[in-house]
Amino acid sequence: MTAEGLRDRLPKAGFGGAPLGNLFAPLGDAEAAQVLEAVTAVATAYIDTAPYYGHGLSEQRIGDFLRAHPNRRPMLSTKVGRRLEPCDPPPDHGFVDPAPFRPVFDYSATGIRDALAGSLARLGRGSVDLILLHDIGRQTHGDDHAAVMAQVEREGWPAMRALRDEGAAAAVGIGVNECEVVLESLDRGLVPDAVLLAGRHTLLDSRAERSGLIDRCQALGVTLIAAAPFNSGLLAGGDHFNYVAAPEAVLEARRRLSTLCAEYDVPLPAAALQFPLRHPAVACVLAGARTADEVRQQAAWLAWPIPDEMWRVLEAVRAEQAS
């Protein structure tokens, strides 16, 4: 599948599967199934997951649901770059009561192939629509960054392209929350079909624009999926910002945005969900949910009418906050 073909297939909004891995709080199997029932009730459903989410739990729950509902055929993406080793009790990576495995970074060709094979087994699929190279970048790997990128270029990326050619995935991409590593990958000639970028093109974070990443992707025809539009829930009423407790300055920025939206009778989460799609490079916005009602609420927010005047004022506020 070409990047253009992927863009044509992606819906405007997809579902991020981290909550199905018990991110921050436990979710029962029955509740997870109800979420997936609501997500896949539409024919254009798209679900993103990863072995890291609940150490395989998110993928297993998705696979269990799809095996029980063979008529549901959502688009699926998952990630490679970590393999799961049996471990009981499992380490704490922000997932409550994860599956008894330890995620270990592995960007080797064998590691990439083994990771996808495990994902396909849990998902009960012979292939997925998109595989994403997960969590490369200096922020994640520190002093090991150069070695990681060398291995990705030498082994990991060729393995992903081979899996695409073999039909195990229709498209390949990068799934990160660091703009710099996407730009570095492009400089190295590792041009993906898609980039899934979490939390960097939102009402509270303009790094994707300031770094030039969005314009670069658009120029190269790379499909951009804007994940985490609520910045870990803060813009939807939560208290986490980029996976940690929100600092006071960010809470104040949210209050200012909320006041502005209220003047136009627009819920802040509706603006947060729609904002990334205003850039022509963004094909899909990806958000998680913990209940079926939240899934339906997000669909309503996506359709909420927002006047052009509010967008103009909001853009000015964002520019001021970024300066």
Image (cartoon, rainbow, N blue to C red):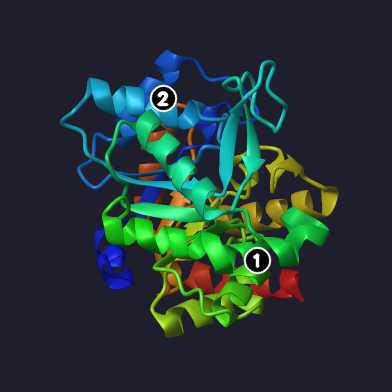
Q: Residue furthest bottom?
A: 219
Relative height, residue 285 to residue 221 (above, below) = above
* Horizontal side, residue 239 vs residue 115: left or right: right
The residue carrying mark 2 is 61
The residue lying at 70 percent from left, 57 percent from top is 256
* Horizontal side, residue 295 vs residue 243: left or right: left
Upstream in sequence: badge 1 or badge 2 = 2
Query: In the rendered view of the protein, which quadrant contains the C terminus?
Result: bottom right
Q: Mark 1 packing: few (<14 Cα in 10 Å), some, or many (20+)?
A: many
Relative height, residue 75 to residue 35 (above, below) = below
Q: In the rendered image, is residue 297 in sight?
A: no
The residue carrying mark 1 is 149
Q: Are marks 1 and 2 in contact (CB under 8 Å)?
A: no
What x and y, as percent, mark residue 62? 37, 29
What x and y, as percent, mark residue 38? 32, 31
* Horizontal side, residue 117 vs residue 87: left or right: left
What x and y, as percent, mark residue 247? 82, 48
The residue lying at 52 percent from left, 82 percent from top is 216
Query: In the rendered view of the protein, which quadrant contains the N terminus?
Result: bottom left
Relative height, residue 132 to residue 184 (above, below) = above
The residue lying at 44 percent from left, 80 percent from top is 218
